[in-house]
Image (spheres, grey):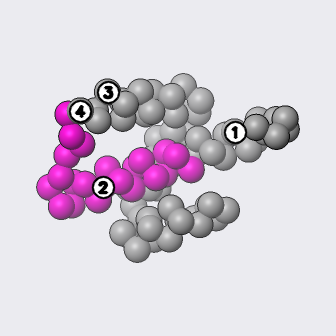
């Protein structure tokens, strides 16, 4: 840790990004008939809970839906580009 604190806006953007990524991952899993392994489910649920707790419900739902609406190509592009928001 370099001692610098992120701003509230940066924190919110991180959680919005996470919601988009989780939403896109959910849609991709559904499209191929995949599920989260039971061993990974508690951690997944904890992460989703953390994201929800740090965004307003409307914000969470909107960004999750945006992620679900991404094509697989767009989701991959978004995942590897740490700076862009669609």
Dot in front, 4 or 3? 4
Look at 58% across and 41% down and name the residue there.
15
Quarter holding residue 72: bottom left
Residue 49 position in % (x across, y down): 45, 27
Which residue corresponds to mark 3?
42
Q: Residues within 10 Å of mark 1 (few under 14, many from 20)?
A: some
Q: Where does label 1 land, which residue?
A: 11
Q: Are marks 4 and 1 in contact (CB under 8 Å)?
A: no
Start and end of the magenta stretch?
17-38
Say which residue label 4 marks: 39
Residue 45 in the image: state x and y as whole percent. Answer: 36, 30
**Spatial separation of the CA atoms under disc 4 and disc 1:** 28 Å
For this orientation, the residue located farthest to the bottom is: 73
Q: Is residue 19 visible?
A: yes
Disc 3 secondary structure class: helix
C-alpha separation, residue under disc 4 versus residue under disc 3: 7 Å
Q: Secondary structure at mark 2?
A: helix
- The residue sitting at 67% across, 62% down in the picture is 83
- Where is mark 2, residue-wise? 27
User: Label 1's element?
Assistant: helix
Measure how far apart labels 2 and 4 are at the Cα level. Answer: 20 Å
Q: Quadrant of the N terminus?
A: top right
Furthest-front residue in view? 1
Q: Is residue 68 above or below residue 43?
A: below
User: For the residues carrying marks 2 and 4, which lies nearer the camera in this image?
Assistant: 4
Between disc 1 and disc 2, the foreground one is 1
Indicate whether residue 30 is drawn in magenta: yes
Q: Is residue 74 left or right of residue 72?
A: right
């Amino acid at each position: 840790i370099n001692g610098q604190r992120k701003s509230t806006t940066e924190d919110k953007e991180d959680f919005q990004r996470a919601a988009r990524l989780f939403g896109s991952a959910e849609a991709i899993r559904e499209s191929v008939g995949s599920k989260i392994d039971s061993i990974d489910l508690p951690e997944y649920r904890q992460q989703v809970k953390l994201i929800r707790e740090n965004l307003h419900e409307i914000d969470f739902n909107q960004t999750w839906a945006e992620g679900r609406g991404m094509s697989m190509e767009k989701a991959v592009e978004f995942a590897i580009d740490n700076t862009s928001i669609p």
